Image (cartoon, rainbow, N blue to C red):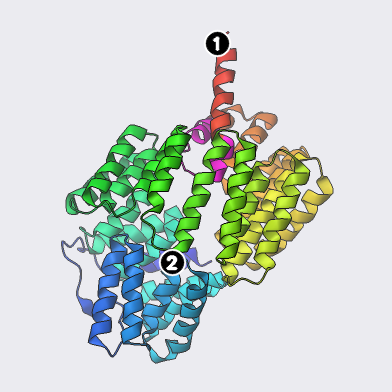
């Protein structure tokens, strides 16, 4: 994966910029070129980058689409469209066009295209090599560092993301976008003190923009400061009612256990979405509220509607995800297997989908199958699925596939009573509440009570509005409270 070369590259870059804590960005001669023959297209491209840095993805996409209309040979705009869009057809067509035009661009742009196209095609080793080479070629390009750090954070590679984003901030101390992503990286690493300092700076730099408040709200929610989070989200709504921060309010209510309020806010949030894919994703998020209420009938009803909607508009990944979630929440093993087969069918039905999205969702489906089989004492099935995931993991450096394998292997080993081996696997997936719960059990079974206590506190404190959190954390908090009450007697 060349993470060590990446570190060395950036250390070299930092060494060449020892006095680099600038108040303004460095000169444009050190930045990634933008190849276009159209001044108007270049203007729209730059506006798109400003929108992206302000976390206005829909606006950025519209600007990029305008740029390629003005210049149909604009390769860099095409690859960024592919990177940002949630429309599978547009993603595939824009990526293909960028790759077709790549020979007519600069070497740096070819590296950018190879990186972003490669991760969509599940070809991670050359993709990350291209990313590293791009960083090495433009070590003083704060925007390239931001894009790279942002991608690393979204991949949950927080240590690497922090390193790259700290470098971006060293080049441009008042770079709002880098401060935002860096705050997320620290928050998701559990370093909330550092994250809040960065968010305060972000708000000071852009007090008239909604995203600083929106991001601050998300970080405060992750820290369990619900009321403060809601206050920040409402500030974002006051600054720009069309920005869509109702989603953050809804997610916060959801993890608070206020599921009726959450569903009302999800409905409001849908009023501001500009794409069908975003609407279906919000519908999926709203359906998770029924899991926290232990209303299995309504879970199935809502998720069936999501899967049906996703199928109708050709969103195979979300269709598969909805079926996978039904399998995760199903009380019966046979019912779970039925939903997993439906998820596999959605992925194989022939809808347009990137190779990475298809293989990563397939790995997640297999991981659910392995965990459910292990829980059902279906050892042969669990071992067969783990073997399949092991093969996938050996052929891909996708973080999603790697973690799916570790989760599945750990679940199977735990069921077999091989606690130390299970621990070594489950520790690799240490941010997934389902794997964390299994790891907590493995620690307790192996006698590692202190490790279990520390992990239990972390697990109980997870406030991410995900299906794994909905399935595990509320009930786990009750378990810990009951144990504490018993111990006090």
**Which mark identifies residue 305?**
none
Give the residues in magenta.
454-472
Q: Can you identify the residue that label 1 sits on?
A: 488
Q: Residue at x 59, y 71 (%)?
A: 355
**Residue 465 appears at what percent x and percent y?**
48, 43
Q: Assign a secondary structure to mark 1.
A: helix
> Magenta residues: mostly which secondary structure?
helix
Q: How many tags in the picture?
A: 2
Q: Is residue 467 magenta?
A: yes
Q: Is residue 233 left or right of residue 328?
A: left
**Residue 31 appears at what percent x and percent y?**
28, 76
Q: Can you identify the residue that label 2 sits on?
A: 6
Q: Residue at x 53, y 75 (%)?
A: 126
> Looking at the image, can residue 138 be seen?
no
Q: Is residue 335 left or right of residue 157?
A: right
Which one is in front in this view, the residue at disc 1 or the one at disc 2?
1
């Amino acid at each position: 994966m060349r993470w060590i070369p990446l570190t060395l590259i950036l250390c070299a870059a930092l060494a060449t910029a020892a006095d680099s804590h600038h108040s303004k960005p460095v000169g444009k001669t050190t930045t990634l070129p933008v190849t276009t023959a159209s001044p108007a297209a270049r203007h729209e491209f730059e506006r798109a980058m400003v929108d992206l840095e302000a976390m206005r993805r829909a606006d950025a996409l519209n600007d990029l689409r305008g740029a390629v209309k003005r210049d149909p040979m604009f390769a860099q705009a095409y690859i960024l469209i592919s990177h940002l869009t949630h429309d599978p057809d547009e993603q595939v067509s824009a990526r293909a066009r960028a790759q077709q035009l790549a020979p007519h661009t600069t070497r740096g742009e070819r590296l950018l295209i190879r990186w972003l196209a490669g991760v969509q095609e599940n070809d991670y080793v050359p993709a990350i090599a291209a990313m590293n080479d791009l960083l090495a070629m433009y070590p003083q390009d704060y925007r390239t560092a931001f894009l790279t750090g942002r991608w690393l954070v979204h991949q949950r590679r927080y240590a690497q993301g922090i390193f790259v984003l700290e470098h971006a901030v060293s080049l441009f101390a008042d770079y709002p976008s880098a401060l935002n992503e860096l705050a997320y990286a620290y928050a998701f690493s559990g370093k909330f003190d550092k994250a809040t300092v960065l968010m305060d700076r972000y708000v000071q730099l852009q007090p008239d923009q909604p995203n600083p408040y929106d991001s601050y709200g998300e970080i405060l929610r992750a820290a369990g400061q619900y009321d403060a989070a809601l206050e920040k989200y409402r500030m974002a709504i006051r600054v720009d009612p069309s920005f869509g921060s109702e989603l953050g309010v809804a997610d916060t209510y959801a993890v608070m256990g206020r599921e009726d309020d959450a569903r009302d806010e999800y409905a409001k949030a849908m009023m501001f979405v500009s794409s069908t894919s975003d609407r279906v994703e919000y519908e999926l998020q709203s359906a998770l509220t029924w899991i926290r209420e232990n209303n299995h009938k309504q879970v199935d009803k809502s998720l069936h509607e999501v899967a049906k909607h996703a199928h109708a508009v050709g969103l195979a990944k979300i269709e598969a995800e909805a079926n996978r979630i039904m399998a995760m929440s199903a009380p019966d093993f046979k019912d779970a297997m039925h939903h997993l087969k439906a998820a596999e069918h959605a992925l194989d039905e022939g809808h347009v989908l990137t190779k990475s999205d298809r293989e990563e969702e397939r790995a997640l489906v297999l991981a659910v199958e392995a965990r459910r089989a292990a829980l059902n004492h279906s050892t042969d099935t669990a071992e067969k699925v783990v073997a399949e995931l092991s093969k996938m993991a050996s052929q891909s450096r996708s973080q999603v596939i790697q973690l799916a394998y570790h989760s599945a292997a750990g679940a199977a080993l735990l069921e077999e009573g091989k606690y130390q081996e299970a621990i070594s696997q489950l520790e690799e997936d240490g941010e997934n509440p389902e794997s964390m719960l299994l790891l907590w059990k493995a620690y307790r079974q192996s006698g590692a009570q202190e490790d279990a206590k520390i992990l239990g506190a972390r697990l109980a404190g997870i406030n991410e509005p995900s299906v794994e959190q909905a399935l595990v954390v509320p009930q786990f908090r009750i378990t810990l409270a009951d144990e504490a009450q018993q111990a006090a007697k």
